[in-house]
Image (cartoon, rainbow, N blue to C red):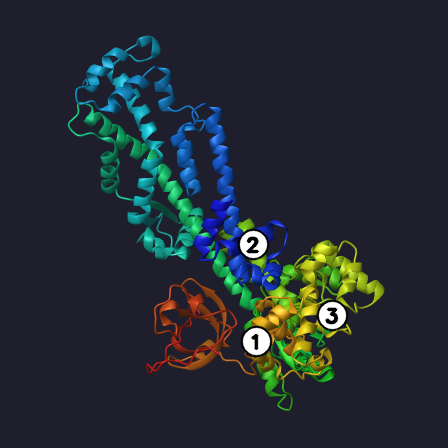
Amino acid sequence: MDKIISALARELGRSAEHVENVVRLLDEGNTIPFIARYRKELHGAMDDTTLRSLADRLQSLRNLDKRREEVRAAVEGQGKLTPALSAALDAAATLSEVEDLYLPYRPKRRTRATVAREKGLEPLAELLFDQDPRGPAPEEAARAYIDPEKGVETLADALQGANDILAEDLSDDAGIRKALRELTLKRGRLVSKATGEEDSVYRLYYDFAQPLSNLQGYQVLAINRGEREGFLKATVVTGRELALPLLCRRVVRPGTPAMEFVKAAAEDAYDRLIYPSLEREVRNLLTEQADEGAIRTFARNLRPLLLQPPVKGKVTMGLDPGYRNGCKVAVVDPTGKVLDTAVVYPTFGEKKKREAMDTLEGLIRKHGVERIAIGNGTAGRETEQMTAQMLKELPERRVRYLVVSEAGASVYSASPLAAEEFPQYDVNLRSAISIARRLQDPLAELVKIDPKAIGVGQYQHDMPQARLDEALSGVVEDCVNAVGVDVNTASAPLLTWVAGLNRTTAKNIVRYREENGPFTARKAILKVPKVGPKAFEQCAGFLRVPESGNLLDHTGVHPESYAAAEALLTLTGYTLADAAEGKLAGLEQRLADYGEERAAQACGVGVPTLRDVVKELLKPGRDLREELPQPLLRTDVMELKDLKPGMELQGTVRNVVDFGAFVDIGVHQDGLVHISELNTPRRVRHPLEVLSVGDVVTVWVKEVEEGRKRIALTMRRPDGIQNPPKI
């Protein structure tokens, strides 16, 4: 265990003490959000992302240890474990190295070398590989092994058998494999060719070659998919002229009678056994790295999407566009309760379009609609144009619209959860309700959908689904707990993501408040069936109880720190009543005058916890999302033909990928800002270094291809002046 702690501390650049504390907390069953928020003194204030990286790496190292011991036991069971092999296993830093060491001892299917050994040719292979300068020539040594009864009828048979044994032994040598693997990764290239002449989206890779060291993850994933679909054939090319000299230097003794024989066996080992095996290994490694990179990108895109600022306190209309089945309409009140629904047909000709506008205008006036959320799917462009035209006819009303991603809305609307939530509405109307609620509170609505269906990644269907689920679920959990949840209004799907809760306890909380009325204190959550002391410890700080008479129940202060919060207020001359009335303007100054460390000691907590308590007292019930840039609402729409090179626009980042960012500029067709066109004086390795989903940015039109519906954008001002940073 000490070895694992040391490795984690070294890799993460953290103290061994902090790492050991985190490992212990994880092993005790504590959740990442709870550890990140309420155990900062124990881990040096690591954030949730770092803690998840630590937990992932901890599991990998433990799996490595487990496999190491399995291999050790297997070899020992064969009676072949030596001190040297045991030490090599202890020193192996990766699963590949452990498997390389196990290769000579792994049970094998019947091979050419197996057959040769059965014919008694192993001593000949050992004799020739020894390459004694005074030893016999291969042909001379082989004469003693001719035995027709064993199937060795000629010198050629004996030498071929010895070659097969030697080639397999060389291919099983861990040192040789490691050296050739490193050479391949350092000097190899991935080459792809077209399998035919048919045009496809993979044409960029029809004659493609790139050093492995420069290969981008999205290129690997694109080539892999192109191969699966039959458009491409890809290989890893190391260069035989580089690999064979390296191999021969390790095994050939120049000037000996058996030198040429061993050299030939080494060439056979490389061509027939080592290279094909290493190519598979390297392709798998490239794919694993590309998958991990894509998963990280997806996760980093998902976080800001979930944390989009809510448009609260507004009656909202949701429009789910469509052709054949019309445009579905739902109006919801500021709490998300459905007020009205309708179906209109704006794409069925001018008369139907006029009727649709009249219907929507009537709903707007009847319910006081102030915001409209339009899904970006099929017929979205026509629906947006109709909405913009309608809003021009309502100049007296301050109605704005926003095009929202409807990714996953259809999945949700057809789910058992949606049927349970809205049994009185059909599938299509449920989508419109979901779209309206996505504008009001993106987090509360998006948690109802499988994170993979939210649509802010690339090649997500090609990735290991279990690993993707794990990573994205971690992001959702972190976001929900960072914001906090109103225990009296949250849906069961939202409560499920709260640290320490699960589907059963979330449903129990909803059932309990339906049967007993709203919770009026945090401690009352302990009355919910199956919410025991451990679950309460994990979830309590993330559940808000606005109906409670205790102000601290409205905040992110954990119940275990209530005494510390009250002691802090007393120490600085305030009361909870002052906090409730917003009369703590001088709290920070009084605390600074007293001294943070001294105050923390007096209150019985660490400085990080003290700072968190102060932050919560200054803004009870605060929502961190309200401090982020608000979404860009519109009243009008442009068309692709309206765009001209050099035109300056504001847009919202919809997706960030390895090669750039897609920006919604209000023409129902996202434009691409290539990584080379980002607004930064330095070169960036990934667009996520400077952009996030939801950012409002200033862009200029670089090029428009109407026929292919492509828009190239730049964040670099045409006049060369440094563009202001994103909003």
Q: Nearer the viewer, residue 326 or 329?
A: 329
Of labels 3 and 1, earlier in sequence is: 3
For label 2, the SS is helix
Count residues near mark 1 (Cα–Cα under 10 Å), then give few for <14, some for 14-19, many for 20+. few
Q: Residue furthest top?
A: 149
Residue 443 x %, y %: 62, 67
Q: Residue at x 29, y 21 (%)?
A: 126
Question: Distance between the Cα atoms at labels 3 and 1?
Answer: 32 Å
**Quarter where residue 596 is shown:** bottom right
Looking at the image, which residue is at 72% across and 78% down?
A: 576
Residue underneath mark 1: 595
Q: Which is more foreground, mark 3 or mark 1? A: 1
- Most foreground residue, 206 or 45: 45
Residue lying furthest right in this view?
Answer: 516
Q: Against 40, is 57 above or below? A: above
Residue 93 vertical position relative to residue 547 in the rendered view, above or below: above
Residue 343, can we see it?
A: no
Badge 2 amino acid: Asn
Label 3 sits on a secondary structure element that is loop
- Residue 37, x across and y down, in percent: 60, 64
Residue position for label 2: 21
Question: What distance separates the C-alpha of mark 3 from that of mark 2?
Answer: 31 Å
* Residue for badge 3: 545
In front of the other: label 3 or label 2?
Answer: 2
Compared with 726, 184 (above or below) is above
Say few, some or many: other residues with alpha carbon within 10 Å of mark 2 (under 14 / 14 to 19 / 20 or more): some
Point 57% across, 62% down: residue: 41
Q: Residue at x 63, y 54 (%)?
A: 30
Rendered location of residue 68, percent (x, y): 47, 37
